[in-house]
Image (spheres, rainbow, N blue to C red):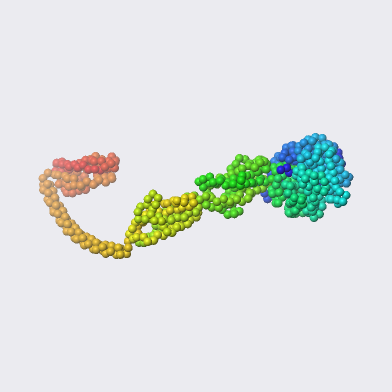
Amino acid sequence: MKGSNVQRSNQGRPGPPPCAIAAAILVLAVAALSAPGSAEAESHTQGIDTGNSLNAVACVPESTDCVVSDSKGNAFYSTDVSATASATWKSWSGPVAPSQAVACPSSSLCVLADGVAAEGGGGNVYYATSLGGAWKEAFSPVFGVDAISCASTSLCVTGQKEGERRYSTKPDSEEWEAILRSESTEALGEITAVDCLTTSFCVAVDSTGYIHVANTQAKIKEETGWKSTDIDSATALTGIACTSTTSCVAVDGEGNVLDLTINGSDEATVAKHDVDGTSKLTAIACTGLACATVDSQGNIFLSADGGSSWTKQFATGTDLTSVSCSSNALCLAADTMGEVIAFASARASVEACGGGGGVHPLGGGGYELCGVVNPHGTSVEACKFEVGTEAHTYTHMFPCESSSLSGKEEPVEVTAKLQGLEPAINYHYRLSVTNKNGTESGPEEQFKTEPVPPGVISESVSAVTEGYATLEAQIDPGGEATYYAEYGTSPCGASTCGTKTSGEGFLIGDTQEEGSLEITNLKPNTTYHYWVVATNSAAPAGVHGEAQEFTTPKSWEEIRNQEDEHLFKQRVQEEAKAKAETEARFALAAKEHQEEEAAVAAQKKREEAASKSPSIAIVKVRVRSSSVTITLDASQAGTVTITGGGLKKTVKNIAAGSHQIIVPLTKAGKRDHRHHKKVKITVQLKAAGKTVSESKTVKL
C-alpha cells in the first residue's frame, strides 16, 4: 500500500521570494539516535543544509529517492537515502524557492509550492518530470499553498489558505482546476495537510480542527463532495495520513494523535490520544499500518498498529518540521537546523500461517510451530515462538528456523521445532519478532499435545496378609493414564495375567508417578502372579509391566499346627544332639588314650634305634608363602642338612628327638609356590660318624 507523501511546513514562517536556487555546500554530520531507555535504534542523521530550516520533505514510494526544500530557496535530492548510512545529496536548482510543500509520487514527477503568496502561504506551484530536472510553473494561486498530496502521477491535490483546494489529473502540466465552492459556503480555515490514498480517496485537515473526506474522484473535484467533520474542537490540525479508506490518523499542535474511523458516508469518528504532552506535532506519514509522527521538540514517535498506540523511538533535540515515508523500511524527517534524519518506521509484522494452521505434530513428541513474518524491509534482530502452559505466560522460547529475514519486503514463513513438551497438555503460544523499532507479537494461539503410550516402570507388593495385598507401581502416564492389575495363581501368559482388579487408578503427568491397587479375597499360603496394566488414548489396549509374583502367608490354624510340629521336632533334635555330644566325649577320650600309648611306643622305638644306627624321619611338612616348616624325628643328635628345589639350603645341629625347622623359600621357590609346583625335599642326618637321609615330595 502506498503511503502518504504529506509534508508539513512551519506555519506562518515566511519564505524568500521566488529566485534561483543558490548552490549549497553539503555538510555531512553522522549521528546515531536512540530511543530513550532502549537499545540503539536504526537511524541516520545527516546535515545537508547547515543553518537553514528544511520545511518540506517527500520520498518516492517504494524507493530510496527523496527531495527536501528549505526556507532560503534551496532544494536537494538524493537517490540513495538509507537509515544506516549517509546519502549523496545534490543541489536542485531552478527558478523557484521550494520551501512550503513538496510531493513526489514517482521519480518522474515532483510537485512543490514556493515562497509566500500575497495573501500568505506558499506561492507558485511547480512540477518537474525528473529528479534534478527543470521546474515548470503549474499555476499561481491567489491563496498560498501549504500542502500537496499525490496519489499517483494521475492525481494530485493541493491545500491552501481560506480552505481553497485544487486538483489535477495531469499534474505534470498546467491543467490544475480549483475545487469550486458555492457562494453560500462559509470560509474554511487553512488547509494544513492533505493525503490522497488513492485517486478516488482524499482527506484534508485544517487549522480549525476539521477533517474533510472525499471518497470518489467525482467528489474530489467538487466542494460539496467533501464531507466535513469537526474532530478537534477548533484546535489546529497539522498533519493527516490514512492507512485505508476507513482509517486515518491526524495530529495537532497540542501533542494529540487522533485515530479516525471513516464510515460509508465519509463521516469521521475520533479516538484522541495525548502522546506528546503540550509539544506541537508537526507532521505524520504512514505506510500500511506503520506510522511516524514528529514534533517541534525533536521527538519521533512510531506506531505499528495504524495509530492506536505509539512509542517515542528517537529524540533528536531539534525542531522537526516534516516527515515522509517511502516504505516501512525508510522514512525521512527534516528539521530547522538543516539536518535530515533517515529511519525505519515499521516494526516487523506477524501473521498467521496459511489457513491459520500453525501447529504440526512431528512424531516422537515433537511439534512444529508455523507463523508468517513481514520485516517490511527492516533489520530483524530476533524472531521467536513464546510457549507456556498458562495463558499470556511464556516460559519457553524457541527461535525461528528460517533464512535471513532482514530487509525482506514480503511475508516470510517461519517455523520452530519444539521438543520436550509434556504430553496431553494444553499449550499457549505466540510468534514474536523484534527489529530496531521494537517488538511485535502475534495473537496468542493454543494447541494440545498428543498423549504418548504409558509405561509401567516398576512394580512391587506390600501389606501382604493371608487374604489381602497392596500392589504398587511406578508409571509414566504419557499425559493421562488409567491403570489396573491382572492377577491369578497361574503364571502370566503372553497377553493376560488372570483376573482384572475391580478398582482402577488415574494418573496425569509426563514423569514417573506412583500408583497403588488393593486386591482382596486371596487364599492363604498361595503364590499369585500379577502385572500392572496402564492405558490411555495412545494405547487403548494397555501396556503391562513385567510379570511378578508374591505369596500370601499361612492361616493362623496352619501356623499353630506348624508351631506344635516345630516344637516336637525341636525337642527330638535336642535329645539327639545331647546323645551325640556324650558319644563324642567318650570317643575323644579313647582317642587321646590311644595317642598316649602310641607316643610311648614311639619313644621306646627311638630309644631302641638310638642304641643302634642313627635315623631321620620327616614327620610333617607345612608349606607357607615364604618358607617351609619341616617336623623331624632324629634318633640321635647330629647335624641336619635340608635341601630341595626352591628351598634355601639349611644346616642345623639337633639333639635326638622331634624338631621343627623353618626353611626359607628361594625366589624361585616362592614362584613355584604360587604355581603349586611339586618338589622333592631331602633331609640328611650326620651322627656318630654315619650319614642317613630321607626324602619327601611335596606341593609348594
- Image vertical order of residue 16 relative to residue 211, above or below: above
Is residue 476 shown left or right of residue 124?
left
Q: Quadrant of the C terminus?
A: top left
Closest to the observer: 393 or 308?
308
- Point out residue 443 in the picture as x, y percentages from the top left corner: 63, 50
- Point out residue 76 in the picture as x, y percentages from the top left corner: 78, 38
Is residue 57 shown left or right of residue 529?
right
- Evaluate whether residue 11 shows in this view: no
Is residue 94 shown left or right of residue 384?
right
Q: Name the quadrant containing residue 197.
A: top right
**Residue depicted at x 23% and y 47%:** 622
- Point out residue 471 in the picture as x, y percentages from the top left corner: 41, 57
Closest to the observer: 493 or 337?
493
**Residue depicted at x 15% and y 52%:** 599
Closest to the observer: 280 or 402?
402
- As drawn, which residue projects farthest toward the right? 118
**Residue depicted at x 14% and y 50%:** 602
- Point out residue 386 in the picture as x, y percentages from the top left corner: 59, 49
**Residue depicted at x 85% and y 47%:** 181
Q: Name the quadrant containing residue 378.
A: top right
